[in-house]
Amino acid sequence: MASIQILEINKLKVKFIIEGVSEVFANSLRRAMISMVPTLAVDFVDIYMNSGLMYDEVLAHRIGLIPLKTDLEKYNLKEKCTCSGEGCPSCQVSLRLNVEGPKTVYSGDLISDDPDTIPAFDNIPIVKLKEGQQLMLEATARLGFGTEHSKYQAVCGCGYKIIPEITIEDSCNNCGKCVEECPRDVFSSNNGTIEVTDIYSCSLCYLCVKVCEENAIQIDENTNRFLFSFEVDGSMTPLKVIKVALNQLKERFAEFTEKMEKLSVE
């Protein structure tokens, strides 16, 4: 049975150990968190006034990359909305910007029609306006997936690695060469005895094995333990991203199973 142990967690980052699963599942979870969790992002920008120095296209691109707080219970994907993708309050939200220089325009200056759908951070710089320069626009955000564009990725970076099993045999003469050679301080010498003190930092470089003249260090990387770490863009909490990713995988597998059963009947 799979088990999870949280090592570190905050509003943006999480590090945990997952045990009792295959590497295939671990990689599927990683890919799902990156590309199968829908988030809100600006998809269309109407610029009514831009007397600043930044081109409209660059300005729209910057606004599109601003992460927005996303409530998946409130919004539908356009293709699944009752409006048939025409655009309504159930599948899109508008954000307006009307500022005049001299001023540095930040993401916090965007005014949303939905008070719960706002930029994840209010200090992201958009453009700097000089005296007399004005910017007036309306942006429309919708739900999308990371497979469509990176601006819809809730996860900024996600990775995992195998947690190996390192065994120090009785033949070890406690010379300390492995402690000196290891670049990640996996080993330490305690009262002349070599111990594994930080297994999570092991990168499987095998330098410890190569330097050990007694062949006393054995590394088994065929384990079912993985160290996961990822960071979100603020649109959702890390735990919410994991739950949505797992539900997406569950739905995909159920759909695949159903189609295979229909094929077997035919």
Image (spheres, rainbow, N blue to C red):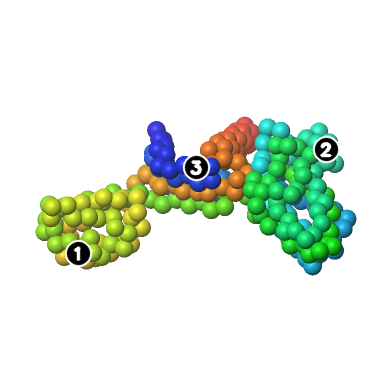
Going from the N terminus, do you reach mark 3 or mark 2 first? 3
Please identify, in this view, whether the residue under mark 3 or under mark 2 is nearer the observer: 3
Which one is in front, 182 or 3? 182
- Contact, mark 2 vs mark 1 (Cβ under 8 Å): no
Give the numbered dot on residue 10.
Answer: 3
Which one is in front, 116 or 194? 116
Q: Residue at x 39, y 33 (%)?
A: 1
Helix, strand, or loop for circle 2? loop
Residue 161 appears anywhere in the view: yes
Please identify, in this view, whether the residue under mark 1 or under mark 3 is nearer the observer: 3
Q: Which residue is mark 2?
A: 88
Q: Residues within 10 Å of mark 2 (few under 14, many from 20)?
A: some
> Which of the image's four quarters has the C terminus?
top right
Q: The disc labelled 2 sits on which kind of residue?
A: Cys
Left or right, 264 with reference to 55: left
Left or right, 69 with reference to 22: right
Helix, strand, or loop for circle 1? helix
Q: Which residue is mark 1?
A: 177
Residue 22 appears anywhere in the view: no
Q: Residue furthest right?
A: 48
Give the numbered dot on residue 17.
Answer: none
Q: Position of residue 89 (x, y in %)?
A: 80, 36
Going from the N terminus, do you reach mark 2 or mark 1 first? 2
Q: Position of residue 35 (x, y in %)?
A: 61, 48
Residue 142 sits in quarter: top right
**Residue 179 in the image: above or below residue 77:** below
**Residue 46 in the image: above or below residue 92:** below
